[in-house]
Amino acid sequence: MRKDAALPAYPCVRGCHAGTVIYPPGGRYGPRWQQDYQLVLLHAGEMTVTVDGEAYPIKPGYAILLRPGHQESFRFAEHQNTWHRWIAIQLLPAAIDCDDASPDAGPPVWTPIPDELNRLTDLMLALKPEHTDESEVMRSLGYAALQLFAAQTGRAGASAAHPSVALAKQLVQERYADELQLQHLAERAGVSAEHLVRLFRQHDDTTPMRYVWRYRVDRAVELLAQTGLSMTEIADRCGFKTTFHLARLVKKQTGSTPSDIRAATRG
């Protein structure tokens, strides 16, 4: 998120809502003038968003932030269904001075969808029957989604993550408890396994599968420190074959045994 493209303040938010739609092959939408801040989450298919005449192709697994005051049109996949969801953040009419709805705000920003953003979208959709767009519940959830997106793009910008690396990491974060192989990561990233290894070495100075195991150990250490789950339960939840395997990698990565970690957190 560009530092000069400030987000609106929370008091400027009139209401928020979420939606979901599946477009058939060859679907189109627009042109339209964007009235709100809108997060669009692409889950399947293809989507090209044209903003003020400039086309932005978006990959599945990515979210894009659209800002008010721009003309947009959408073109979806020609030969398959396209599923996307959205969160719209509506501003108060008198709050125009609070937003950055101008060409100076820069081009649209997109990033791999954080798992937390998916969960916020799920929650907003589930709460729609019980809460109006203007309710404090929906306003706060929608605004939290906007801030989460800004934080995610800020981190991505700071690390200059390659999109394929980011997509592979997203799969790890979603399915680290499962049997993940290099080919699974490459398929999510949209590149060959060999190319993904090169990208990870270039951008993260590691390999995809080393990242998988480091992430699993990090999650296991969290559970050791913060829960009373048994070693067997933690191993199962974090993708380890055995408790011995879990203990060995925790010791190798942290320098402490699982028992040491538990003892340190319990005084």
Image: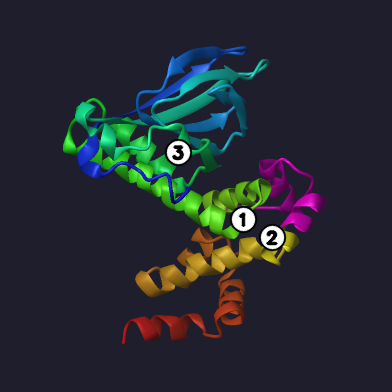
Measure how far apart labels 1 and 3 are at the Cα level.
Answer: 20 Å
Give percent across and percent down for residue 72.
Answer: 50, 21
- In the image, residue 77 sits, relative to residue 165, either above or below, namely above
- In the image, residue 131 sits, relative to residue 233, either above or below, namely above
Residue positioned 23% across, 25% down in the render: 129
**Amino acid bearing label 2:** His
Give percent across and percent down for residue 196.
Answer: 75, 52
Residue positioned 60% across, 67% down in the render: 214
Check the image and tell me how it is coloured. Answer: rainbow
- Mark 1 / mark 3, whichever is N-terminal: 3
11 sits to left or right of 217: left
**Amino acid bearing label 3:** Ala
Measure how far apart labels 3 and 2 are at the Cα level.
Answer: 28 Å
Give percent across and percent down for residue 62.
Answer: 55, 38
Residue that numbered label 1 is attached to: 160
Q: Is residue 187 magenta?
A: yes
- Mark 2 / mark 1, whichever is N-terminal: 1
- Mark 3 / mark 2, whichever is N-terminal: 3
Magenta: main secondary structure equals: helix
- In front of the other: 258 or 207: 207
Q: Split into 4 quadrants, where in the image is the C terminus?
A: bottom left
Dot in front, 3 or 2 = 3
Neighbor class of circle 1 (other Cα within 10 Å; few <14, some 14-19, many 20+) is few
Residue that numbered label 3 is attached to: 105
**Amino acid bearing label 1:** Ala
Residue that numbered label 2 is attached to: 203
